[in-house]
Image: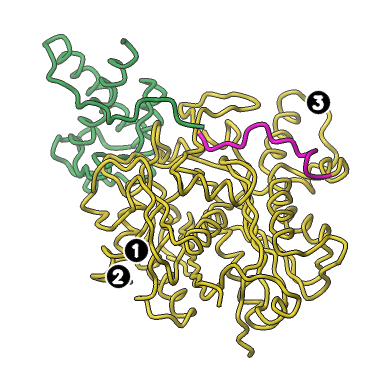
Chain colours: A yellow, B green
Amino acid sequence: MPHNKVVVTGLGAISGAGIGADALWAAAREGQSAIGPVEFERPGQNTIKIAAQIKGFDPAKHMDAGTISLSDRFTQFAIVAADEAMAQAKLSREQKLGERAAVIVGTGVGGFTSLDDMMYIYNVTKGRLQPMTIPRVMSNAAACHLSMRYGCTGPVFAVSSACSSANQAIGVGAMLVRAGAVDTAIVGGSEASITASYIRGWELLRVLTPDYCRPFSAKRTGMTIGEGAGILILENAETAKARGAIPLAEIAGYGTSSDAKDLVRPDPAGAAAAMRAAIESSGLPPEEIDYVNAHGTGTVINDAVETEALRTIFKDRLGKIAVSSTKPIHGHAIGASSALELIITIHAMREGVAPPTINWLAADPKCDLDPVPNKARKLPIRAAMSNSFAFGGINAAIVVTQAQ
Amino acid sequence: MHQTFDSSPRPEPREMNSAQVTDRAAIEQQLIDLFVTDGMIDRSAIKPDATLESLGIQSVDIMMVLMSVEEKFGVYVPIDEKLADTKNLQGFIDHLIDRIAQERKTSAT
């Protein structure tokens, strides 16, 4: 089997920090949180009043009326992020990408806003349903809209693995390029599920903080939900070079694993297995990893378990590696989260700056790592890893290196 | 966009006067009732030093109890370090009472 080098030639994002990968990176680097009071279209009995929400989003600025009528908010986010990534990669919609191109987009719950609307109209108001509800709701809608938009006739599918969705989508896309099955893969994740009912569902799990998300910190009380999309253009380094595309980074390794233990309780062995597999697949010694963008949700258990898993991988060197969580910036955007975080990781590596873990108060002995507390730090980064661990026990990690 | 609320950690509950102590005992009784009804724990097995494990209380039972606490007392209790580290029933109940007392104080001011 061939072993092609996989490069990233385009990045695009929309998040609570605004539209654009640059806006996301600037917020992460400056420690500017996008978390604030949440607004629901139909308010409910919610105790949690905050989220990293995208406010004032107007799809008409980004796509035609036909596309809007056929798409849920999560698909619209994916389109905005993908258009940005395609533009950076200097790929045009006019030139169809064809059968050598894949589209793989992760999502936790797909078109949840449209589903929530349908349930409300059908069960409560007894009104007229939107006729295209089903094609809007389906989890593969974002991937399919992108395939039509850019003429990708190769492998197209959704990955739905809760919080690990995007890392798995990116990883599988990278493996397809590496194996020579395709030359281009449009990959990432999208999530738009901030409805009162969805937030209420998370409240019942008691993992949402009523005030501040402070990963790896003492006195942490949980996570905050976010939304958005992150899309990356992956290409075979040779075909990218041949068309004069500029590589931004290399996807060097990908690893995924399953705890096969508990639906909600994370397992350090499973988390470590994904990281080990990602590092092995990169062929790099673990000593070359200088920065880790952690899953770092800010829940008591995730951060302690992730620290334990990182310790088994990096051993005594753990304290010398910058490990930060940017979730207090963009929120936990579930199926989009690891795409947003990989985009931040690539910016961090290119700029030589480790973004901070904000809201950090004091060390927790169970999280004995260097979380880059509260302030960004200059740091030459040779290689970096981005982690994601999902409900269901699915873990996925990606290793990126500087583009040669 | 910035968060607009106070970031300082919430203060620890202070010592209570006698009226508050009675209040505390009443809340404790209500919480024990919740463990019996929602946690499905045999009332005779409830002893202060009983561990959650010995009572067969699992994470899903804790979530049911925390939901009832929210419904009954209007207090959202996230899983924080103290709750996660609590091993016995009394510790768990004490933590809930502290949170309820804290919340009542906050909403009173």
Q: Of the residues shown, which amino acid type is indicated by label 2? A: Thr
> Residue visible at 85% across and 39% down?
A131
Is there CB contact under 8 Å for labels 1 and 3?
A: no
Is there CB contact under 8 Å for labels 1 and 2?
A: yes
Q: Which percent across, then down, holds residue A44? A: 57, 24
In the rendered structure, the answer to whether residue B45 lies left or right of residue A354 reads: left
Q: Which of marks 2 and 3 is nearer the N terminus?
A: 3
Crowding at mark 1 (Cα within 10 Å: few <14, some 14-19, many 20+)? some
Q: Are marks 1 and 3 on the same chain?
A: yes
In the rendered structure, the answer to whether residue A68 lies left or right of residue B109 reads: right
Q: Earlier in the sequence, mark 1 or mark 2?
A: 1
> Residue visible at 40% across and 74% down?
A276
Quarter of the image where the N terminus of chain A is located: bottom right
Say what secondary structure mark 2 lies in: helix
Quarter of the view holding residue A7:
bottom right
Q: Of the residues shown, which amino acid type is indicated by label 1? A: Pro
